[in-house]
Image (cartoon, rainbow, N blue to C red):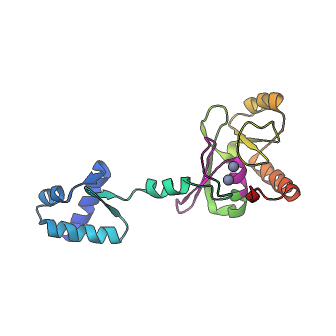
Amino acid sequence: MLPDQRKKQILDWLEKENQLRVTDLSKRLGVSEMTVYRDIQQLTESGELVRTSRGVSKKTSSSSEMAGRGSCTYCHKPNAGRQQIQLIDENNHVEHLCCAHCGILRYDDLQNGVSQFICKDFLTDTTISAKMAYFLIGADPVMQCCQPQVIPFASKDQAVKFQKGFGGSLYTLAEAIDELNSQMNVSGCCKKH
Ligand SMILES: [Zn+2]
Ligand SMILES: [Zn+2]
């Protein structure tokens, strides 16, 4: 087997098995451990593998996603709440934001660079595209995150019901961008908190 075929094979196995030991790889591939080490070295350098205490594992996008989930790209607060937002650009790079407030402002910053703007319906936790969502701004506080509070809803009916109890005004994504920008100009930037 050629070195390139071996490397592809190693990555294929890791895709299914997550973690492999060098001795196992050496047996499976029928090559010396030294050869396996050399293959692994190259794959590690190219960023496709990570060395672990027990062997190697595939470098998954989740390791970088986990890092991103640590804090909000926009306001840099820790992403702790359940109302986190994901913005995905054309290169599949994922940004994590603490709530719809930061999601919308960041989306506005990036403009056309965003291919997906994913948020969660406040009532059902269903994942929805922000482009289809309704946003309630100015309601009574129900989320402990950025001000002004922005609450996403998948269904306009449910958003209206919620609004009857908690107040605020409903906006589409485009309207919410305008509304937030105008409110931020008056009250200052959320980055201060
Ligand atoms: Zn934020
Ligand atoms: Zn927030």
Q: Residue at x 12, y 65 (%)?
A: 31
Residue 140 screen position, x and y as percent = 81, 36
Residue 138 vertical placement versus 180 (above, below): above
Residue 111 screen position, x and y as percent = 70, 62
Residue 106 vertical placement versus 131 (above, below): below
Question: Does the magenta portion include 82?
Answer: yes
Q: Quadrant of residue 109?
A: bottom right
Position of residue 153 in the picture relative to residue 15 (left or right): right
Position of residue 17 in the picture relative to residue 65 (left or right): left
Question: Does the magenta portion include 109?
Answer: no
Residue 151 screen position, x and y as percent = 73, 41
**Image quarter hosting the N terminus:** bottom left
Q: Quadrant of residue 47?
A: bottom left
- The span shown in magenta is 78-105
Task: Mark yes or no: residue 47 visible.
Answer: yes
Q: Residue at x 77, y 30 (%)?
A: 162
**Image quarter hosting the C terminus:** bottom right
Residue 35 vertical placement versus 64 (above, below): below
Q: Return the residue nearer the eye: 187 or 121.
A: 187
